[in-house]
Amino acid sequence: MYSNSGWLPQTAVSSPAGETEHAGDNTCGGALAPATTASLAARLGGLRGRFLLLVLGVLVGVGTAVGLGSVYMTDRIVHGLGSGYALQYANQLHERLLAGIQREQVLTQKLVDSPLLKRWADNESDPELTRQALAELDSYRTLFLDKNYFFVVDASRNYYANNAANEFAGKELRHRLNPADKSSGWYFATMKDVDNFELRIDPSTEPGVAGLWISATLRSSDGRKLGLGGSRLGLSSFVEDIVRRTDPGVETWLVDDAGLLLGHPDGAPMQANTQNTDSALRKSAFSLLHDARQVELLSEALAQLACEGKRGSAQRELTVDGRPRLVAVSYLPEIHWAVIVLVDPARVTQLASSRPILVLLAVSLLAIVLLISCLLDRLVLAPLARLAAHARAVADGRYDTVSPERPDEIGQLAASFNRMTTAVADRTQNLELTLAQRSQALQQSNSLLEAADRKIVDSIDYARLIQSSLLPKPAEMARLFADCAVLWLPRDGVGGDFYAVYPDGADGCLLALGDCSGHGVAGAFMTMATKTLLDRAVDALGMDDPAALLDELRSGVAALQHGGQASGDGGLDLALLHLAPGRKKLTFAAARLALWVVHADGSLDVIKGDRRSISHRRSGERDFANQHIDLGEGDRYYLFSDGILDQNGGARGIALGRSRLAGVLRSWHTQPLAQQAATLQQLLADYRGNLPQRDDIALVAVSLTRVPPASRGSA
């Protein structure tokens, strides 16, 4: 049976009464009769026909493309309108600003061209000329926009001035300029560097308001500079009219050709500039940009316009305060200024009228998407969800859950699912059988491996017991030395390091410590063989010549290497320390090992042995040498293998090394040797951390004092 919810395959379920019920008969539209279902199936055909409804998706795609195209075209239109608006606005401000300044400039030039003022500058002492000149200057004062003037006679350096309030009428002579006065430096710099006229920004006493000084040189008929005249034009009105009175979405900056801010709608940068005379502390247009590329673009525009030296404009796209702006730059070569207009195109070009259309388009697309989603859910997704539920049942091991087939694509999928379920059930049964058989075989193998491992561990433990029995007993060590300690740490349970003590006479002895090639069982066999060779050499040669014992061991060690077909320089490292009877003489000889002596005052001496191991004698190789050592009260003697020095660890995983070991031995020189050995073992464990032990470790430390007499023999 099929439901009207996309002809979903139904699962037969047996009721308690033995009747057959069918899941999924109820839908949002109510139950449909089988005839209605068949009619709908006939009209729409198979599942592929119903998927033709997805053609509506094309509408969504087309709508999206049209929307994106509209946005792109709108953006281009806005960009074009904004660019034109910015350029036109900048040019208008350019003309407004230039018109006022040019008027003042013309008046200033006319003032310094006055014949009367030129005669007066040549004859300032004439009272009549002075009266006429001051009257003419006052007439120019009334013509200047800010009703002020200044005039300097170069011969006397007298400074004349009056302001808009006519405050200095009759007192126009204000003061005399002095070259030594820094406040008068502007005049002398202007007379030196300016040939015609100069425009100069000068801070006002009022915070945030700057003035433009328009200066022109007064010249005689023969070209001599007679003085300087001009007026101060306050920029507050220009800032108010040009910078602050702008349209919405428009911002205007005034800068010089170096980018220094002369006008800005925000008062903070302008106040900083009017209060700082140091150019390094003054704000520029570049300081308002937070990206190096943006600074480079604006700098290039200003530099290009300044280089051309004529009126012109440039356009750029910049990001200011995190928002994209269209920027137009208009240059005024007469005063070396530039007007920068920043336009926010989104605010300047109002496209609010298109919002209803965009809203309608968005609502239409949303409705189409919802409709398609509903159809897909009813016709495809819901049937597939139920088929997925059957798949989960199979995954849980319920292989009797089978969906009946149906004559369309989903029916074909259900048939394939049924075949897969049967195959999975068969293979699962076979796999479980195979897995049980292999698990049993694996358990048997593990049992054999565990038994073999136990045998190996037992063998190593027994080998350790045997090797330990060859080492000196603690009681024998304690009888020979009043204070002694031993640290023996094979890397693999047993190893290639060993030590031995041979009593000599009443209170003498021979102390030996060796490091054989190899680790583990192989190294242990070498120690036993080497110990046997050393016993024979002691019996044959005695103990008072340790170097002769080392030479005697050469042939025996070489025979061991030859029998084992050893290659390279591997052999035996051995140290022998002989204490003569009477404890008056101490003789040391060693192959690649050293004797460390820590004195009672904590100082340490290292007595090195020969720098070669005991192996086959090479041609021309000399014999080993004895070294005689003076006995000192309270001296302690340490023999050890290189496993201690080579142990890696610490924060960087490097070897412990001689310097660290020497440091701790010196610091412990007052401690008993047994305590030193225990502390050293803990230090090695802490230093190694999680790293493995690298080599076998052996150390014997003794303090030589008189001991009770004992018979001669190996311990």
Image: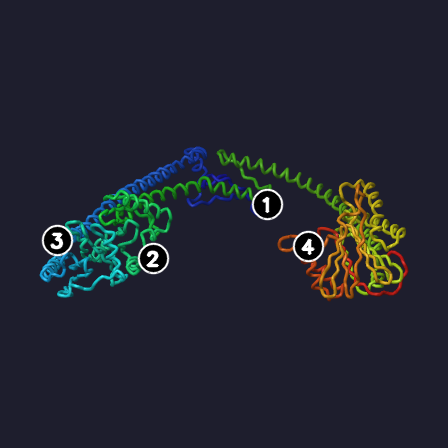
Q: Quadrant of residue 155?
A: bottom left
Q: CA distance from mark 4 to mark 3?
A: 97 Å
Nearer the N terminus, badge 4 or badge 2? 2
Q: Quadrant of residue 188?
A: bottom left
Q: Is residue 466 visible?
A: yes
Are discs 1 and 4 less than 8 Å apart at CB? no
| Identity, as a three-letter code, of the amino acid under mark 2 | Leu
| Identity, as a three-letter code, of the amino acid under mark 1 | Asp
Q: Is residue 78 visible?
A: no
- The image shows residue 694, relative to residue 632, as above or below, that is above
| Identity, as a three-letter code, of the amino acid under mark 3 | Ser
The numbered mark at residue 396 is 1
The numbered mark at residue 114 is 3
Are discs 3 and 1 less than 8 Å apart at CB? no
The numbered mark at residue 527 is none
Q: Which residue is mark 4?
A: 657
Closer-to-camera residue (169/468): 169
Q: CA distance from mark 2 to mark 3?
A: 41 Å
Label 4's element? helix
Label 3's element? loop
Mark toward the viewer: 1 or 4: 4
Nearer the N terminus, badge 1 or badge 2? 2
